[in-house]
Image (tube, rainbow, N blue to C red):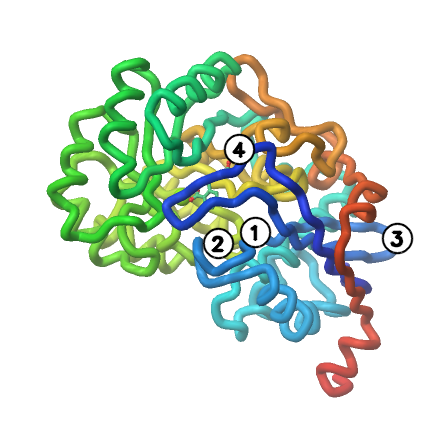
Amino acid sequence: MRIERVTLREIRLRLKAPFETSFGSISERRILLVEAESQGLTGWGECTAGDGPFYNSETIDGAWIILSRFVIPAVLGKEFESPGDLWPLLEPVRGHEMSKAALENAAWDLTARDKGIPLAALLGGTQKEIACGVSLGIRSRPEELTSAIEAELAAGYQRIKIKIKPGKDLAFIEAVRARFPSVKLMVDANSAYSLDDAGHLKKFDDYGLMMIEQPLAWDDIYEHAKLQAIVETPICLDECIHSLHHAETALELRACRILNIKLGRVGGHAQARKIAEHCRSLGVPVWCGGMLESGIGRAHNIAMSSHPGFVLPGDVSASQRYWAEDIIDPEVTVSPRGTIELPAQPGIGYEVRRTRIEALTVRAETFRIDAAILVSGGR
Ligand code: OSB
Ligand code: MG
């Protein structure tokens, strides 16, 4: 297989409601879609970089440049047997995992479609349905949060994650616990605290939380190890883990007891699977994180989550929680038991609504093999 043509596209999708985290509030997503073509077949990927460098250092505008100048030219026209073989071509580019993942994931979809099998099967996934949780943004008052949670539990979701930040934490955790004493509950700080807050974070131990996600700095595994020695609640790392090596380091240092894997953050399906397998070999639970993806990214998350290492409910929820209308057909739906069934169709398993995507597109650029040859100096 070789990719003959790649199209980058930016679409805009308005969220049904603003989503607030410790690093800011977002109302509309600018989404970079990657379309990779070979012999009349198309594979789709989604870049999960945000508008600003506030979750991690990548941005959609930066990703557009990195993809155009470095990632696409490295891959275009190159023969590969498995999309996993593309990673060595991308390794010279340091960082920019979300840019690499966007193209590699499109190659995974393309390859699965070429073989006529679901992407999950190509990845070695074994679970026929996956367990779903929800992530709830920061609210101004605890009562708003508890009524939102009531609706999510009624819809069947298996675990509740609430976003927190200093000043918007204990009162909210307390209110949720008082109202829902036995619900599977966790919190996500998105790096809003420091080690000086260890005494405060230790108070969270009283609420039977499944885990605290990424309390400390986005790039500091070492201080999480110090914090995990103080708090009893398991720490789950998100922002800190960009590679298998980071995962190995974090577990060896006992900086966390659970990992959240995000496809974009770790550079795509091949690296995600390596991390999931490493964790599984150590008995460390992992779950699939979300980045407010459109249906395309969501479908990739579902395929990844079918790997046997994903033993905890992930942040993979129904399209309708975020979008009035998604860009795939059918939309992602969740059963009353809080599960998503793996699709049986080839590739990501959902039809990509090209006409709708074209109508939402604000910019697009296509790269062909001849152009790649020019960039790489004729080789
Ligand atoms: O830290 O998990 C996170 C959304 C944007 C950026 C970071 C995070 C999140 C979420 C949303 O928690 C999860 C979802 O897509 O449902
Ligand atoms: Mg997180």
Q: Do the residues labelled 3 and 4 touch (CB within 8 Å)?
A: no
Separation of marks 2 and 1 at Cα, in angstroms = 8 Å
Mark 3 Cβ and ligand 1 under 8 Å apart: no
Residue at image position (73%, 38%) is: 327
Can you say whether 198 is above or below 52 in the image?
A: above
Please, what secondary structure does the residue beneath circle 3 have? loop
One can see residue 305 in this view: yes
* Sequence-first disc among 4 and 2: 2
Tell me if residue 155 comes above or below residue 167 in the rendering. above
Disc assigned to residue 48:
1
The residue under label 4 is 316
Asked if the residue at tag 1 contacts the one at tag 3, i.e. Cβ–Cβ closer than 8 Å, the answer is no
Some atom of ligand 1 lies within 8 Å of the CB belonging to the residue at label 4:
yes
Q: How crowded is mark 4: few (under 14 residues within 10 Å), some or many (20 or more)?
A: many
Q: Distance between the residues labelled 4 and 2?
A: 16 Å
Residue farthest toward the right in the current orientation of the protein: 40
Which quadrant would residue 303 be assigned to in this image?
top right
Circle 2 Cα neighbour tier, 10 Å, few/some/many (<14 / 14–19 / ≥20):
many
Q: Which of pointers 2 and 3 indicates the residue nearer the eye? A: 2
Q: Residue 265 carries which label?
A: 2
In whole angstroms, how far apart are the C-alphas of marks 3 and 4?
A: 31 Å
The span from disc 3 to disc 1 (Cα, nearest Å) is 26 Å
Q: Residue at x 48, y 54 (%)?
A: 265
Which residue bears the numbered disc 3? Answer: 40
Please, what is the three-letter code of the amino acid marked with disc 3? Answer: Gly
Q: What residue type is labelled 1?
A: Thr
